[in-house]
Image: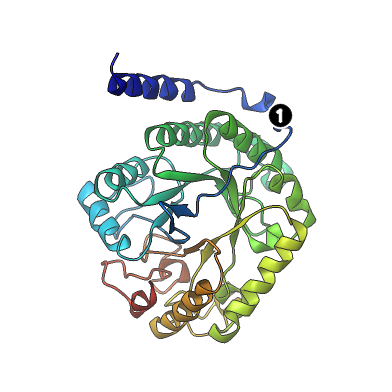
Amino acid sequence: MSARRLQSFGFVIALLCALVPQPARSLGRDEPFIRRPYPDTMGGAWTGRGVAYGMHRDGQRPGGKSPSRAQIAEDLDLIAQHWSTLRIYGTLEPAGTVLDVIAKQHPAMGVVLGVWIDPEVDSTGGVVRERPEAVKANRAQIDAAVKLAARYPAIVRAIAVGNETQVAWSNHRVAPSRLIEAIRELRVRTREPLTTAHDYNFWNKPESQIIARECDFLMVHAHPLWNGQSVETAIPWTEARLAEIRALHPDAPLVLGETGWATQRTDTGDEAKYMKAPSDEATQAAFMAVLEAWLVTRPLPVFVFEAFDENWKGGDKPDEVEKHWGLYRADRTAKPAVAHTR
């Protein structure tokens, strides 16, 4: 059998084995636990500067209309000019299209693949109810992650299982035991380094240790704007939060999974309560300038939040902050901050 046929045959066998469902609830923790290193270089080049990518445009949304392949290709052409690594938040379509376009057009680009995990029980009003639709959705996310990691092993650099599922303010809190089950299952079924993504205000608490011990690295969200900081205090504040987490988890590598600056916000509710600095394009550009200067001094993998404005997010108010974190506007025109990215 030729080498090429052997390689193809091996790939098929690996893919089939990866797709075999695993009894997650019977899986224990690996002992000794050996961390899989986060791949922050490729071919000797630093790949630590990344960006979060939400691909839905105006008139599109998760669970609704999806972007076309041509639109995704246009996005990736813009992103590839500034960043070498993407972070996406789910494994269902159009995630597969994103990875396929990268494989064909930007093969040097890497992806941290997010596995969206929803709560499988609802305890509203003190009554615990099972959510079979969430169980089914979580299973689809996990199985798709396995399939995509096997199909694109050179592109999927790491897998983030769950996003902000443990912090008190999350609207999709998941039981720690269920999150651990999902991480352990993916450890058996994939080869990539694994993490779960959380706000700094979870990772700096002792209760985070039970989950941190399951992770190859910790993906930390730290948003100075949401925490009352100015551009001048943003980096010292971020450094202090990371130092707290390192003190609690001295053996765990850190990746800054989200940081950024929004360009619009409302003057009501939590946005008015917690955000003290201006939210406009000039201030976003100033933040990006200090962030880039800081990254020159330290090899910390960072994902800027985020590539494009996403007007489907949040409520009906057009200036709601969740819609306006992009370094590009929703129409894909660049904001001034793009000029400060390397």
Residue 63 in the figure: left or right of residue 77: right
Residue 300 rendering spot, x and y as whole percentages: 55, 64
Q: Residue furthest top?
A: 1
Q: Residue at x 39, y 56 (%)?
A: 54
Residue 212 rendering spot, x and y as whole percentages: 69, 48
* Res. 325 image quadrant: bottom left
Q: Quadrant of the N terminus?
A: top left
Please, what is the three-letter code of the amino acid marked with disc 1?
A: Gly
* Res. 57 image quadrant: bottom left
Q: Residue furthest left?
A: 70
Question: Height in image: 228 above or below 75?
Answer: below
Residue 287 in the figure: left or right of residue 57: right
Residue 250 rendering spot, x and y as whole percentages: 74, 57
Q: Residue at x 24, y 52 (%)?
A: 73
Q: Residue at x 36, y 52 (%)?
A: 109
Q: Residue furthest right?
A: 206
Q: Work out whether residue 259 or residue 119 is closer to the camera in this orientation and state it.
A: 259
Q: Inspect this view and state whether residue 246 appears.
A: yes
Residue 293 rendering spot, x and y as whole percentages: 49, 78
Kind of element beneath mark 1? loop
Circle 1 residues within 10 Å: few <14, some 14–19, many ≥20: few
Question: Height in image: 105 above or below 7?
Answer: below
Residue 306 in the figure: left or right of residue 38: left
Q: Inspect this view and state whether residue 115 appears.
A: no
On the image, numbered disc 1 is attached to which residue? 28
Q: Work out whether residue 216 or residue 283 is closer to the camera in this orientation and state it.
A: 216
Q: Quadrant of the C terminus?
A: bottom left
Question: Height in image: 253 above or below 211?
Answer: below
* Res. 131 image quadrant: top right
